[in-house]
Image (cartoon, rainbow, N blue to C red):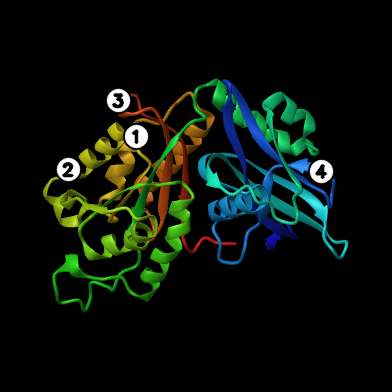
Amino acid sequence: MGWKDGRMTVLAAGTLPWRRRRGELEVALVHRPRYDDWAWAKGKVDPGELFPVTAVRETREETGHEVRLGRPLPTTTYTFRDSKGRLALKEVRYWAAEVTGGTGTLDAEVDEVAWLPAPAAAERLSYPHDRDQLDSLVRADEAGRLSTWSLAVVRHAKAQPRKGWTGDDQLRPLDDRGRDQAVHLVPLLAAYGLSRLISSPSVRAADTLAPYAVTVGQPLRFKPGLSEEGFAEDPGRAVHHVERLLERGTAAALCSHGPVLPALAQVLRGIVDPADTDGEVGAAVLDALIEDGMDKGEVLVAHLVGTGLAARVVAVERHHPGDTA
């Protein structure tokens, strides 16, 4: 919770799970008997939790489905009366999501999950503001921009300062804050289903992705061209590693250093889809990153369609372990 425009604001996140059944796009709605309404799976952000993590957790709790987040959808802000009758704001961030597993077990707040074609879902939704997310999802689908894969660019977490470090700089480790950031990155990266993990061989970069690598059981692949030293020697090697990931089209995380990241972001900036509204917003995000850099432990998530020379960025997000509700 927080305050916005002089009112208490409740922060929440959710998803629109989607699938294609016999060629037709379907989305999942949940029914809450307490309110007798049909809406998207969503819930409040827990203290210290990032919005994408909330979206995945609440979807699992309310639908029984594990999901992988895709492109972000419009945020909804509306007023409501809290338990004491006070007028408050609720801000809900949404993502398109694909089901990856789950038991189908629902929590006590939901008694039914309905998969419906988009027109039927629009009719069943109880609140007009929930149609904004559905309209955005349908437009993306019609443009061939709904099924995406994610590339996360991570700046290594906070390390022990160079001042006072007498050893090889590539061996300089994370400090206590950095180790905490690395742990908090685990559910964030998991929300996007990232499976290919690339890192600078420097200890501070490798140890930033190591907790996630252990959690998902995937190896870390080390690329000297992503280190500060390798980039200084040959900037083209770092760019090459991004281009290789674009060729593969596999959801991936790449961890590197402050001086390297603008060059990596420049590659993504060059393939932003100009025909996509979210892509235009993403271009501004990338321009800011190229100009100002990233904080330690910060994550840039680019949502892409296509591979190789046909790869296009259709949306961009930035998240930081310290940027919590």
* Secondary structure of the residue carrying numbered label 2: helix
Location of residue 47 with respect to 262 vertically, above or below: below
Tell which of 45 and 31 is nearer to you. 31
The amino acid sitting under disc 1 is Gly
Callout 4: 10 Å neighbours few (<14), some, many (20+)? some
Residue carrying label 4: 37
- Mark 3, Cα crowd under 10 Å, few <14 / some 14-19 / many 20+, is few
Q: Amino acid at mark 2?
A: Arg
What is the C-alpha distance between the residues marked 1 and 3? 11 Å
Residue at the image point whose x is 36% and y is 36% from the top: 269
Q: Secondary structure at mark 4?
A: strand
Dot 1 alpha-carbon crowd within 10 angstroms: few under 14, some 14 to 19, many 20 or more = some
Label 1, on which residue? Answer: 249
Does label 1 or label 3 sit earlier along the sequence? 1
**Which residue appears farthest toward the left when viewing the image?**
233
Residue highlighted by disc 2:
237
Closer to viewer: mark 4 or mark 2? 4
Given residues 255 and 123, the one toward you in this image is: 123
- The picture places residue 162, in percent across and down from the top left corner, at 23, 72
Q: Residue furthest bottom?
A: 164
Q: Which residue is mark 3?
A: 309
Real-space Cα distance between discs 1 and 4? 39 Å
Crowding around mark 2 (Cα neighbors within 10 Å: few <14, some 14 to 19, many 20+) is some
- Secondary structure state at the residue bearing disc 1: loop
Comparing labels 2 and 1, the label whose residue is closer to the camera: 1
Amino acid carrying mark 4 in the image: Asp
